[in-house]
Amino acid sequence: MRLAVILALLAAAPATANPLSDLIVGSNPCRNLSPIDRTDTARLSRATIDLDGDRVMIAGTGHLRCRTSPGTWIGLDAAARITLAAEVDLVTCDVQGLTVELDDFGGAAAPVLRLAEAALEDALRDDAQRELVRLCQDLVED
C-alpha cells in the first residue's frame, strides 16, 4: 500500500502537468492582483520525496507566472520561484510542516507580485494542503 502512495506521489511530482501544478493554475492565485490578474503558468519542476515509515517528506521547487488578462491595453507579466516543503502522514493523511515560499521575482510587474507575496503564499499553501490531503486520501482508499 505504501509503495502505491509513493509511486503516485512521484508520478505527480516533477512534470509539465501534474496535480499540484494544475490545482495552482485552476485556483488562479493571481486573480486579485491588478493589473496582472491571470495565472499564466505554475509548475513544480523539481521534487524530492523521502519515505520514513508512515511519513513522506516532499520538497519541491517550481515557478508561478502571472499576466494581464487578454484584451488589456498593456501586456505585463511577473514571475517568482515557488519553494514547497511538506510532511504527510500516510495513515491519517495529515499534512504537517507545509511551507510555500516565493522568491526570485522577475518580469515587468515584479513589484506587484512582491507586494502580494504573503497573500499569494497563503493561497498557494491552502491549495497545496487540500491537494496533498486529497491525493493521500484517494490513494489510501484504493
Image: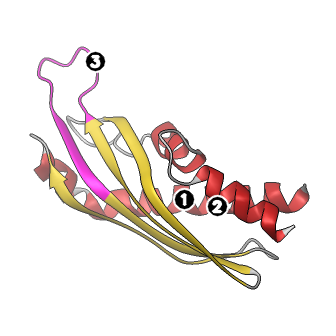
- Residue 89 on image: x %, y %: 72, 78
- Label 3: few (<14), some or many (≥20) within 10 Å? few
Q: Amino acid at mark 3?
A: Pro
Q: Are marks 2 and 1 in contact (CB under 8 Å)?
A: yes
Q: Nearer the viewer, residue 90 or 5?
A: 5
Instruction: Please state the total of marks drawn on the protein image.
Output: 3
Q: Quadrant of the C terminus?
A: bottom right
Q: Nearer the viewer, mark 2 or mark 3?
A: 2
Quadrant of the rendered image containing residue 99: bottom left
Q: Circle 3 is placed at which residue position?
A: 70
Is residue 70 in the magenta section?
A: yes
Q: Circle 1 is placed at which residue position?
A: 128
Left or right of 140? Residue 57 is: left
Q: Which residues are magenta?
A: 67-81
- Label 1: few (<14), some or many (≥20) within 10 Å? many
Q: Nearer the viewer, residue 20 or 112?
A: 20
Q: Amino acid at mark 2?
A: Leu
- Residue 138 on image: x %, y %: 80, 54
Instruction: For marks 2 and 1, give the CA distance.
Output: 6 Å
Q: Residue at x 54, y 73 (%)?
A: 86
